[in-house]
Image (tube, rainbow, N blue to C red):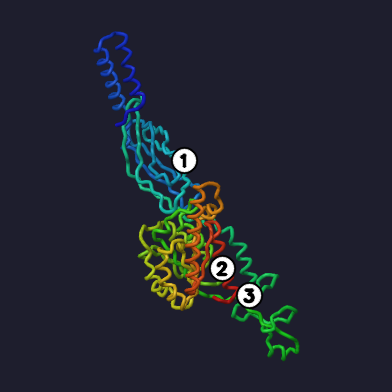
């Protein structure tokens, strides 16, 4: 049962007979009248438990996009149900309107559409629906909370896909598939062509030249069918928000762009999310199925507030592939203490694989180093400079141990990592 504002106002009006008649008994009589009207209103109200509920749920939606879900209410009771309906979606589902007015005559059905704009990944769930049915006077309502489970899957937004066409064009240039005819420094033989001024003399094929009695050069293409292993750190450091985006979401964006690029280049991509256990894994997928499996695997994963177990990463990579591979480690390197585990396993990984460490940096730290107008800003600038110095020290240590480093702000890191992949392909290091 629930009391409405009308009932409260009706009780408050009991002061009028007290003032008019000057007798306390008048207040008692007024309260008895209000209570009687409330009981009668409650008895006449339709039963919310006679309402059968159902849901029509949308398919997966990308983070930030708008979708709609429909709640179906069928009144199997003998009285009209008129009142409010609240569908209990969590705040992260981005519900525009949480309560809806509804009037369902006996034996009829109504539909309520709820617009959702989620601002967090994962499963956005609504477990219960509360129905409040008022009587004709609108004083008292019957209320029931009914379990009606429903969920909307919110996928990573993949905003970095806007960088994909330009990077694919560069890959096609490396592979000699455009009119620019730019050849990469790969190691796989592609074709022979006539020598032109500016060609590297080391590319001259002397046997073919002798047969044709004209200078002929070999052309090369970037290697195909190489292995790219992406390991995303889902430990406590990945929960930090940079530019209002968790580090792990930036890592997912970088992984999606790199996977789309590498798959188009003919390389095999494997993806693992790990902290002290495997939180998600994608192996053996190619083409369009790769991105579908990646976003589906990424969607429900949230950071764990535990330390990353770097000692298990070499064995994890070996379980994925025994071949030489490009290993991308998406983690945080802005704290030397937290990076000790990473540095301890880098030599073991770098002996067999090409290792690239990808880390997001906070643009507000760079901005703080430029503001020194007062004492507070000077202290902030000093702290920011120390943070950048720590980042530089860890980056230098990674390079000394045989790895490579790619850093950038959340919007800059995905294309920067893609550019590093293309540069490695062009240099024939994969």
Q: CA distance from mark 1 to mark 2?
A: 42 Å
Label located before the other in sequence (1 or 2): 1
**413 vs 297, nearest the viewer:** 413
In the rendered image, which quarter is residue 199 located in? Answer: bottom right
- Vertical comparison of 22 with 407: above or below: above
> Mark 3 or 2, which is nearer the eye?
2
Q: Which residue, given by chain and number where applicable, does mark 1 sit on?
A: 96
CB within 8 Å, label 3 to label 2? no
Label located before the other in sequence (1 or 3): 1
CB within 8 Å, label 1 to label 2? no
Q: Position of residue 147 (x, y in %)?
A: 32, 44
Label 2: state its secondary structure.
Answer: helix
Q: Residues within 10 Å of mark 3 (few under 14, many from 20)?
A: many
**218 vs 45, nearest the viewer:** 218
Image-based side of 369 in relation to 91, left or right: right
Q: Which residue, given by chain and number where applicable, does mark 2 sit on?
A: 420
**356 vs 208, nearest the viewer:** 356
């Amino acid at each position: 049962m629930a009391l409405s504002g009308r009932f409260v106002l009706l009780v408050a009006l009991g002061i009028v007979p007290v003032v008019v008649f000057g007798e306390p008994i008048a207040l008692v009589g007024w309260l008895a009248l209000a209570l009687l009207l409330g009981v009668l209103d409650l008895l006449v109200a339709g039963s919310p438990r006679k309402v059968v509920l159902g849901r029509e749920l949308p398919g997966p939606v990308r983070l930030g996009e708008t979708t709609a879900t429909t709640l179906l209410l069928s009144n199997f009771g003998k009285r009209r149900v008129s009142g409010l309906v609240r569908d209990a979606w969590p705040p992260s589902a981005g519900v525009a309107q949480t309560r809806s007015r509804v009037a369902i005559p006996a034996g009829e059905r109504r539909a309520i559409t709820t617009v959702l704009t989620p601002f967090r990944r994962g499963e956005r769930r609504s477990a219960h629906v509360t129905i409040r049915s008022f009587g004709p006077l609108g004083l008292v309502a019957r209320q029931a909370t009914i379990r009606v489970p429903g969920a909307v899957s919110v996928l990573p937004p993949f905003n970095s896909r806007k960088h994909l066409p330009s990077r694919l064009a560069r890959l096609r240039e490396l592979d000699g598939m455009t009119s620019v005819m730019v050849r990469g420094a790969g190691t796989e033989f592609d074709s022979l062509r006539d020598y032109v001024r500016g060609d590297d003399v080391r590319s001259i094929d002397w046997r073919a030249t002798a047969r044709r009695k004209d200078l002929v050069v070999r052309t090369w293409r970037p290697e195909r069918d190489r292995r790219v292993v992406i390991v995303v750190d889902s430990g406590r450091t990945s929960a930090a928000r940079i530019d209002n985006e968790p580090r792990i979401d930036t890592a997912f964006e970088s992984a999606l762009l790199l996977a789309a690029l590498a798959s188009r280049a003919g390389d095999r991509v494997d993806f693992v999310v790990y902290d002290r256990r495997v939180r998600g894994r994608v192996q053996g997928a190619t083409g369009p199925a790769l991105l579908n499996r990646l976003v589906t695997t990424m969607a429900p994963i949230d950071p764990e507030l535990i330390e990353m177990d770097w000692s298990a990463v070499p064995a994890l990579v070996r379980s994925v592939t025994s071949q030489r591979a490009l290993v991308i480690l998406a983690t945080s390197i802005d704290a030397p203490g937290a990076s000790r585990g990473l540095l301890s396993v880098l030599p073991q990984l770098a002996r067999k694989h090409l290792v690239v460490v990808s880390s997001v940096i906070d643009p507000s730290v760079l901005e703080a180093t430029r503001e020194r107008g007062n004492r507070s800003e000077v202290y902030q600038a000093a702290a920011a400079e120390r943070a950048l110095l720590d980042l530089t020290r860890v980056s230098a240590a990674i390079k000394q141990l045989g790895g490579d480093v790619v850093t950038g702000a959340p919007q800059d890191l995905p294309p920067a990592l893609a550019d590093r992949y293309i540069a490695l392909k062009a240099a024939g290091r994969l």
